[in-house]
Image (cartoon, rainbow, N blue to C red):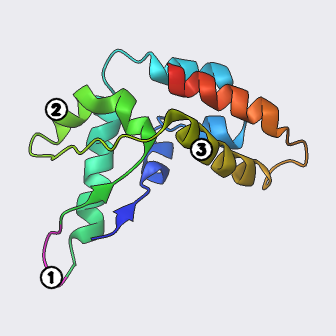
Amino acid sequence: TNPEECLVSLNYVLDSQQMDVTYPAHSYMRHLLSMEDNHEESLRFHRRVLQYLQQDDPHGPRRWVLKTPYFLAMLDGIRSVYPNAKIIHMHRDPLQSVLSTSSVVTKTLGVVTDDIDPRRIGAHQALVHEE
């Protein structure tokens, strides 16, 4: 099983950091990080999408390996919606994490604008990681 980025499914319920990455909507990201329902409604939709994607798999249900720093803000919801989940938290140098995320954001922004300021992106990603 390969690790998979699955944030796209959360776009449909407006609970994804992709909005902040694609369209610098920083106040929206702050809203997401402060949600009090632990993102459970969004994660229930997420679970339905994954179930749909594997329903016709000839090998039967498989273990999903999902990776995104955004899940750190959703751990309580993940434990509730996926009670059998095995959560593995890999430690990564925070600087390397911010640099990696900033690189992804820079590439994503390049689709919608030519106004790309790597310093501004890096500063914002450092704040998001801090929260």
| 68 displayed left or right of 17 | left
Residue at numbered disc 3: 101
Figure check: 4 above or below 40? below
Which residues lie in the magenta part? 58-62
Query: Sequence-wise, which precedes: disc 1 or disc 2?
Result: 1
Q: Is residue 24 visible?
A: no
The picture places residue 101, in percent across and down from the top left corner, at 59, 44
Main SS of residues in magenta: loop
- Residue at 49% x, 52% y is 8
| 88 displayed left or right of 35 | left
Q: Is residue 111 visible?
A: yes
Figure check: 16 above or below 126? below
Residue at numbered disc 2: 80
- Is residue 69 highlighted in magenta? no
The picture places residue 46, in percent across and down from the top left corner, at 32, 47
**Amino acid of disc 2:** Ser
Q: Quadrant of residue 4?
A: bottom left
The picture places residue 74, in percent across and down from the top left corner, at 33, 30
